[in-house]
Amino acid sequence: MFKRKKPDINLLPEGDVATHIAKGPIIFSLVLLLGALGIYAGLTFFHSLQVNQINSLTLEVQNFEEVEKQEVFNTAKLLAQTKKTLVDYKNFSQTYFDVGKKLTEFESVVPAQVQLTSLILQNDGKVTLTGVGPNPEVVEAMVTELRNQKEKFENVSVISVAKNLNGYVFSLSFSLKK
């Protein structure tokens, strides 16, 4: 029957409605500005993350290159040491290639009555030996024979001669001629 008309409730006074309508574009502009600032901040953040990742990868590559250089340096150093050792061995083997022959020649100088107890051959060709002879004259004859064969032996010297129960123990040194 009687319909009641809904009252028009306006919480803003009439003068404020016009102001409110005018503020709409300003608020929209502020929201757009804040959105743009948010996008800019996000892009800047992601850019800094990417730069940090690039810097981290660059540092890892540099560290890897340094380790690789060190390994190459160590390998080169080992190769140089090996080469030097081979050159030293080659020089030694060329110089003393006939060591067996020279020691056989030395054997011909040792009298049958002398018993050798040790013989030490050093890399430079120096020989030190010890042995036992029946008397000092046999030991002296052996030393004289070594000294007389100057083309084969040099720097012949008697280190010691002493009497013991088995005879005369002696120690000699000499160098094989190159």
Image (cartoon, rainbow, N blue to C red):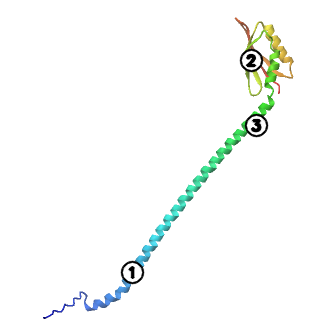
Q: Say which residue label 3 marks.
A: 87
Residue type, label 3 = Val
x and y percentages locating residue 115 in the rendered image: 75, 11
Label 2 sits on a secondary structure element that is: strand
Query: Which residue is at 39% across, 80% downward?
Result: 30
Looking at the rendered image, the disc whose residue lies closer to the viewer, 2 or 3, is 3
Q: Say which residue label 2 marks.
A: 129
Circles 1, 3 touching at the beta carbon (< 8 Å) = no
Residue type, label 2 = Leu
Q: Which residue lies furthest to the front in this view?
A: 1
Instruction: Give the class, few, some or many, for how many residues have Cα within 10 Å of label 1's Cα (few <14, many ≥20).
Output: few
x and y percentages locating residue 77 in the rendered image: 67, 43
Label 1 sits on a secondary structure element that is: helix
First in sequence: mark 1 or mark 3?
1
Query: Which residue is at 42% across, 79% downward?
Result: 33
Number of numbered tags placed on the structure image = 3
Residue 105: give its label. Answer: none
Label 3 sits on a secondary structure element that is: helix
In-image side of 27 versus 139 (left or right)? left
Looking at the rendered image, the disc whose residue lies closer to the viewer, 1 or 3, is 3
Q: Quadrant of residue 147?
A: top right
Establish if 116 lies above or below 34. Answer: above
x and y percentages locating residue 72 in the rendered image: 65, 48
The one of 76 and 139 positioned closer to us in this rendering: 76
Circles 2, 1 touching at the beta carbon (< 8 Å) = no
Query: Which residue is at 81% across, 18% downward?
Result: 106
Residue type, label 1 = Leu
Establish if 85 lies above or below 131. Answer: below
Q: Quadrant of residue 161?
A: top right
Residue 30: give its label. Answer: 1
In-image side of 45 versus 71 (left or right)? left
First in sequence: mark 2 or mark 3?
3
